[in-house]
Image (cartoon, rainbow, N blue to C red):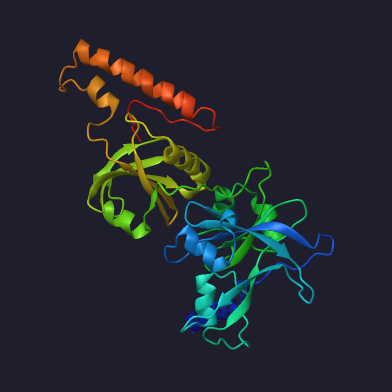
């Protein structure tokens, strides 16, 4: 009987939780509008062009992120509204319901159940966004496994300030599907790391899991300062897959930005990337000949004569000269190690 009562109380508490889709209340001390960001992670893969079309924004307003897109919007408190929203037009598709539209726009849409959806009719959607004096605010949909701590670590912002902005009495009570507002980091850095490149393939999370047999230890071939490296077979190719924790998004984006731009015969080629669970993944071509240390310290390896050394030295000089000219002007952190080609 006690168990039944506990289940009923838990259900009532959860069903009364309706934060998903709630917008931030207008504040008269703020200006009429502010720049804001929507952190959009589509449930099905979308291209940048498809995302731009869905949200009816200019391509310059959309940037790729680790697992989706950041969309710059003009957040405001229009006449007759008591909450901050951004508006966009949407043509109702065959079979649309408010639930499917919510899912399509990652729960940012304010549901209007009293409004009948008519196929081919263009309607105005209100999407939740946030304004806070002096800081940029990101609207983010909570994913399964997220906690306020991991979210704030990922966006390099402060838990207490995020909880205060969202009026969360208990920061532990956030649920998958909630939309929360994340304030700008204290150090003034952009809190959503983004990049623009068509040179890297976006792989679904399940493909990465299948390629590594769910990150099997039997396929682990290395350990770096930011994560583990696994051997994998992805779309018919042998690849090396680096797994990083999603709190390392800054380092992940730094490496991704560099490798999408820099190409050299002596540099491992980046094939693509993926995100899922609490991990980020970089997919590289497999270094068939192993790492440098394999040849320097392996007593059974074939002897490398002076002539080969002589040919290798100019190649190494060419590589490091290329890196210095092409990469060093960009603020980044290198991870060049003889024992880890990734």
Residue closest to the eye, 172 or 127: 127
- Which image quadrant is residue 255 in? top left
- Which image quadrant is residue 25 in? bottom right
In this rendering, the answer to whether 171 lies above or below 257 is: below
For the C terminus, give its image quadrant.
top left
Residue closest to the eye, 71 or 249: 71
Residue at x 53% of width, y 43% of height: 250
Residue at x 68% of width, y 69% of height: 23
- Residue 229 can be seen in this image: yes
Q: On the rendered structure, is 276 left or right of 308?
A: right
Residue closest to the eye, 214 or 124: 124
Q: Residue furthest top?
A: 306
Q: On the rendered structure, is 34 left or right of 291?
A: right
Q: How many numbered marks, from 0 up?
A: 0
Rendered location of residue 206, percent (x, y): 34, 59
- Residue 144 can be seen in this image: no
In this rendering, the answer to whether 281 lies above or below 113 is: above
Residue at x 47% of width, y 55% of height: 67
Rendered location of residue 85, percent (x, y): 69, 68
Q: Residue furthest right?
A: 29
Q: On the rendered structure, is 301 left or right of 121?
A: left
- Which image quadrant is residue 186 in? top right
Rendered location of residue 339, percent (x, y): 32, 28
In this rendering, the answer to whether 340 lies above or below 170 is: above
Rendered location of residue 314, percent (x, y): 32, 16
């Amino acid at each position: 009987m006690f168990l039944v009562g506990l289940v009923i109380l838990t259900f009532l508490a959860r069903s009364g939780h309706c934060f998903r889709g709630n917008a931030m209340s207008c504040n008269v001390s703020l200006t009429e509008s502010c720049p804001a960001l929507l952190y959009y992670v589509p449930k099905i893969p979308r291209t940048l062009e498809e995302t731009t079309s869905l949200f009816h924004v200019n391509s310059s307003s959309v940037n790729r992120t680790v697992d989706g897109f950041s969309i710059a919007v003009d957040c405001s408190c229009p006449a007759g509204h008591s909450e901050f929203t951004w508006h966009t037009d949407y043509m109702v598709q065959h079979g649309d319901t408010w639930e499917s539209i919510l899912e399509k726009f990652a729960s940012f849409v304010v549901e209007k159940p009293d409004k009948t959806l008519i196929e081919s009719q263009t309607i105005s959607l209100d999407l939740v966004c946030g304004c806070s004096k002096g800081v940029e605010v990101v609207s983010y949909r909570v994913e399964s496994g997220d906690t306020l701590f991991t979210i704030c670590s990922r966006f390099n912002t402060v838990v207490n300030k995020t909880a205060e902005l969202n009026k969360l009495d208990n920061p532990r009570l956030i649920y998958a599907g909630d939309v929360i507002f994340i304030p700008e980091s204290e150090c003034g850095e952009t809190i959503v790391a983004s990049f623009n490149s068509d040179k890297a393939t976006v792989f679904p999370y399940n493909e990465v899991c299948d390629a590594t047999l769910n990150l099997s230890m039997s396929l682990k071939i290395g350990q770096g300062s930011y994560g583990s490296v696994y051997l994998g077979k992805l779309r018919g190719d042998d690849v090396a897959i680096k797994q990083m924790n999603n709190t390392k998004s800054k380092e992940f984006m730094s490496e991704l930005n560099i490798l999408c731009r820099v190409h050299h015969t002596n540099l491992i080629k980046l094939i693509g990337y993926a995100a899922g669970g609490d991990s980020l993944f970089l997919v590289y071509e497999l270094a068939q000949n192993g790492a440098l240390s394999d040849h320097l310290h392996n007593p059974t390896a074939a002897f490398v004569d002076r002539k080969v050394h002589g040919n290798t030295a100019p190649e190494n000089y060419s590589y490091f000269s290329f890196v210095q000219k092409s990469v060093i002007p960009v603020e980044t952190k290198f991870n060049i190690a003889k024992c880890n080609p990734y």
